[in-house]
Image: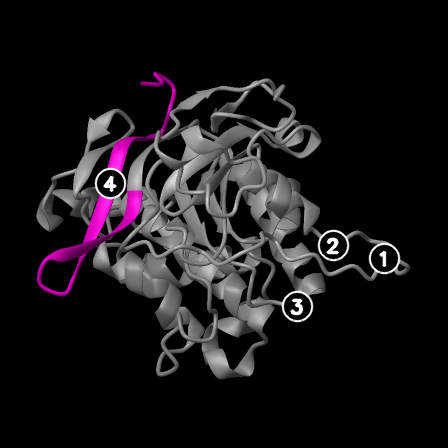
């Protein structure tokens, strides 16, 4: 347990029933901690459990096993009535700015909803909405307009304003820039970085884009089939990845060189079914370093040479 952590996940597991007697383990024994003011990135291919982990972190869904602590308090099994006061302190920004805003409400009503739900007086709501619009870089007259009048980047700014309305301490950003053009992504990332510094926010930033998490995140956790396979400071992970999955993802990051037209796939082979994962190391079916031990013995998350943690019997750079 990390004493200074705002959020701690310990042995977190989430199963979903599939048919009568089968289950899909979307998150498998995940332990993480986020410090105040820190941004922790979660990366991995689609279907690795990133979004489920983010929803667990703010208790939008309940875990099957494990512990979630927010500011030291175990919230793993709290009912909705007990969770309600904590909702102010933890908010989520969703991937699609086109579907996450109610098209029937104007911007003022969209941002005002959480304020009304938590009892702010009506005369205070208008000034608070105006303040939030300024905070996210939108003009005051945006309050009277409807979502269809805005671009994708502007809609995501509205979503951020709504998430900030109750002065949260933790924001979960679930692929919050993936639906935006590259230039707009940069603007939203800069906004999030500024808000983190100004408001002391902690961010759990979920993305499949390593270039994005490199820019924003202090540390990065790499997920594969529901498991954390590597966790390290951002600079260390990019300089010396320890897991072969991480190395493959990094190799596939496009280089800013117009002469480089390579299109390496992130990882060779198909992602195994999360309903029936491989025995041993779940990555062994796609790993270039896999040996007999990998097919039978699950590796544990252990200290790595780059100062982080890695779940691998034969990390990158290890002797044969």
Q: Quarter-wise, where is residue 219 in the image?
A: top right
* Range shown magenta: 1-27
**Mark before the other along the chain sequence, 3 or 2:** 3
The residue that mark 3 highlights is 181
User: Mark 2 falls on what kind of element?
Assistant: loop
Which numbered circle lies on residue 260? 1
- In three-dimensional space, the C-alpha distance between marks 1 and 3, rounded to whole angstroms, equals 21 Å
Characterize the magenta stretch by its predominant secondary structure.
Answer: strand
**Mark before the other along the chain sequence, 2 or 4:** 4
Q: Quarter-wise, where is residue 72 in the image?
A: top left
The answer to whether residue 145 shows anywhere in this view is no
- Give above or below for 284 relative to 318: below
Which numbered circle lies on residue 254? 2
Mark 1 and 3 residues: CB-CB less than 8 Å, in contact? no
**Mark before the other along the chain sequence, 2 or 1:** 2
Write the residue at 50% across / 83% down.
148
Of residues 125 and 272, the one nearer the viewer is 272
- In three-dimensional space, the C-alpha distance between marks 2 and 1, rounded to whole angstroms, equals 8 Å
148 sits left or right of 126 in the view: right
- Give above or below for 182 relative to 53: below
Q: Residue at the front extreme? A: 292
Of residues 16 and 66, the one nearer the viewer is 16
Q: Residues within 10 Å of mark 3 (few under 14, many from 20)?
A: few
The residue that mark 4 highlights is 13
Q: Residues within 10 Å of mark 4 (few under 14, many from 20)?
A: many
**Mark before the other along the chain sequence, 1 or 4:** 4
């Amino acid at each position: 347990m990390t004493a200074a952590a705002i959020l701690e996940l310990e042995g977190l597991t989430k199963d979903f029933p599939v048919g009568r007697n089968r289950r899909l383990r979307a998150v498998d024994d995940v332990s993480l901690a986020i410090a105040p003011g820190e941004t922790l990135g979660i990366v991995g291919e689609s279907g690795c459990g990133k979004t489920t982990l983010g929803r667990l972190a703010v208790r939008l869904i309940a875990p099957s096993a494990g512990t979630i602590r927010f500011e030291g308090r175990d919230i793993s099994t709290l009912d909705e009535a007990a969770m309600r006061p904590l909702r102010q302190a933890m908010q989520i920004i969703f991937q699609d700015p086109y579907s996450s805003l109610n098209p029937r409400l104007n911007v003022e009503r969209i941002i005002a909803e959480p304020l009304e739900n938590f009892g702010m007086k009506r005369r205070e709501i208008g000034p608070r909405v105006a303040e939030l619009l300024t905070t996210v870089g939108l003009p005051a007259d945006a309050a009277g307009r409807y979502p269809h009048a805005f671009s994708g980047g502007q809609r995501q700014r509205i979503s951020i304003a709504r998430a900030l309305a109750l002065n949260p301490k933790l924001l979960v950003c679930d692929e919050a820039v993936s639906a935006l053009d590259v230039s707009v992504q940069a603007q939203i990332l800069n906004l999030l970085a500024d808000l983190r510094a100004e408001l002391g926010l902690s961010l759990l930033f979920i993305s499949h884009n390593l270039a994005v998490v490199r820019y924003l995140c202090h540390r990065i956790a790499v997920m594969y089939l529901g498991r954390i396979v590597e966790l390290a400071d951002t600079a260390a992970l990019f300089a010396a990845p320890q897991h072969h999955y991480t190395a493959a993802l990094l190799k596939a990051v496009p280089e800013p060189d117009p002469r480089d037209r390579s299109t390496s796939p992130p990882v060779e082979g198909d992602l195994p079914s999360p309903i029936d994962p491989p025995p041993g190391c779940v990555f062994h079916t796609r790993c270039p370093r896999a040996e007999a031990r990998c097919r039978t013995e699950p590796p544990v998350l252990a200290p790595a040479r780059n100062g982080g943690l890695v779940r691998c019997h034969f990390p990158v750079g290890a002797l044969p």
